[in-house]
Image (cartoon, rainbow, N blue to C red):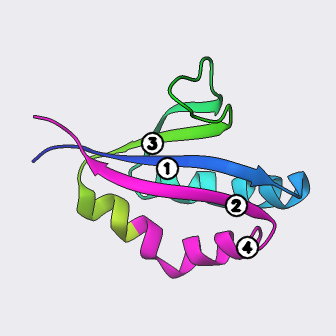
Amino acid sequence: MPKAYWIACYRNVADGDALARYAKLAGPLLQAGGGRFLARGAAAATYEGGDNQRCVLVEFDSVEQARSVYESAAYQQALDQMRGLVEREVRIVEGVE
């Protein structure tokens, strides 16, 4: 079964404290759900029209595992900390075997 990668790209952070509250709750939830942080921070380089924004890359053992964490009630409560204050997109991508 191929691994899965959770990719979060932040477009706008209107409230850094809201992002910090989310991160304090979400980080342990992602790890408890089997996620492994591979990268997080501002882009080192940006090409082809991309924004120099914060990105987070988390590896999971499967798409199902990543989706289960995202859709969990506990993770949704963590998201409530930044709803309307932080704009981002999250994608879960299946890895290549």
- 66 sits left or right of 14 in the view: left
> Amino acid type of disc 4?
Arg
Give percent across and percent down for residue 32.
Answer: 47, 56
At label 3, which amino acid type do we have?
Val
Magenta run includes residue 86: yes
The residue at 45%/42% (across/down) is 58
- What separation in Å lies between label 3 and label 4 (alpha carbons)? 21 Å
| SS for callout 1 | helix
**Quick check: marks 4 and 2 in contact, CB under 8 Å?**
no
- Vertical position of residue 47 compared to residue 95: above or below: above
The residue carrying mark 1 is 31
Residue at 63% across, 26% down? 43
Q: Which residue is mark 2?
A: 87
- Looking at the picture, how far across and down is residue 97, in whole percent? 10, 34
Residue 53 vs 32, above or below: the answer is above
Q: Which residue is mark 3?
A: 58
**Callout in the foreground (3, 1):** 3
